[in-house]
Amino acid sequence: MSKVYTQSLADGITIGLGYLPVAMAFGITAKPLLDLLSAGLMSALNFAGAGQFLTLQMLNNSSYIAIIIAVFILNSRMFIMSFKINYDLKHLDFFKRFLISMFVTDESFAVTSRYPEERKTFIDYFVTLFISYVFWIVFTVVGYLTGEVMSDTLVVASGIALYALFIALLMPSVRDYKNLVVAGLGMGMHFLFKEIGLASGIAIVLAMLGAAWIGLFLDLKDKNWRSVS
Amino acid sequence: MSILKLILILTVVNLLPRILPVFFVGKFELPDTVITFLNYVPIAALGVLIFPGVLTAVETPTHGVLGAIFAALLGIMRVPLFFVVVFSVAFVYLLMFIM
């Protein structure tokens, strides 16, 4: 197997491991509410961690319209992430970008965003995204079928997996003070926007855009300073 | 409306924001400021995705924070992603027995 495949395969499995506890938790939570086919279909077709949990939560006491609007707001951040991925891959043709974009998630966005130039290829992205997608579906079904026999402690402990992934991705870039400020502000703004009661999706989008905007501001200031000194 | 219909509508709702950029990108040149802005989006997103979610990720906020610090140390040591994920889960698993 070529190096490209093994690297992307490893990345896909890493994201997949992060999904594992979340997907299982989804399967377990869905069990009293949905039949296996619906739960599996939801993971296969919606592929939206938080969105799927939100759907389950609202299923009993909200109208379908309310669910659709809530999920739409929650997932609006995907537009920004997919936009960035499409920009990074703008040398690829329409069909390939279309195929990749269908599988964009927070995690795959975060992982692929630090791929160097030579890995900005269709195969690199697609393998990473598709492997993680398969994990999501498989472990939804596994959770649904075997949830009760799993060690609770291990399932709870694996809740750290996605956060460990995000933190490990963040670490190398915070050596640059601007990145440190942007990440810190992202955290602070998200916390603040949630505290003042904004809907989760809106809080995420505003914090993301706000923090990135500060990054742009710091960047411009840096450049001006360099050009006068 | 059946659950199946809801799932199908949600499929469209989930795909739409992911697919729309495919149609825009490449049609026009973006100004440098927009590109710089876009380059900060991943870092901003990571911050947003980590906090405050990590406080409710596992049994207690303390476990979450300690797990986060552990993952950060592994990240600084340039441990490959896969192992950061596996070791952090093991670390929190042990934490749950000792505190």
Image (cartoon, coloured by chain):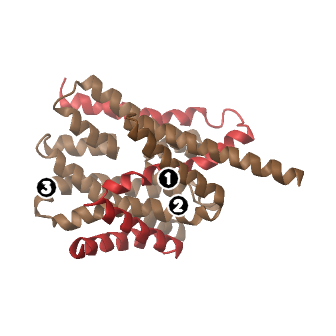
Q: Secondary structure at mark 3?
A: helix
Residue at position x 76%, y 52% from top?
Answer: A222
Residue reaching furthest right?
A: A228
Disc number at residue A145? Answer: 3
Callout 3: residue from which chain?
Answer: A
Confirm or deny contact between disc 2 and disc 1 (CB under 8 A).
yes
Residue at 28% x, 45% y is A43
Q: Is residue B43 visible?
A: no
Residue A60 visible: yes
Q: Could you tell me how far apart the alpha carbons at marks 1 and 3 are, in whole angstroms?
A: 34 Å
The tag on residue A170 is: 2
Describe residue A90's horizontal placement relative to residue B95 as left or right: right
Q: Amino acid at mark 3?
A: Leu
Does residue B72 sit above or below A73 in this rendering?
Answer: below
The spot of residue A135 in percent (x, y) is 32, 57
Image chain in red: B
Image location (x, y in percent) of residue A179? 61, 56
| Residue B61 in the image: above or below residue A72 | below
Amino acid type at circle 1 is: Gly
Residue B6: quadrant of the picture: top left
Pointer 1 residue: B47
Q: Choose the circle earlier in sequence order: 3 or 2.
A: 3
Are dots 3 and 2 on a single chain? yes
A214 vs A23, nearest the viewer: A214
> Label 1 lies in what chain?
B
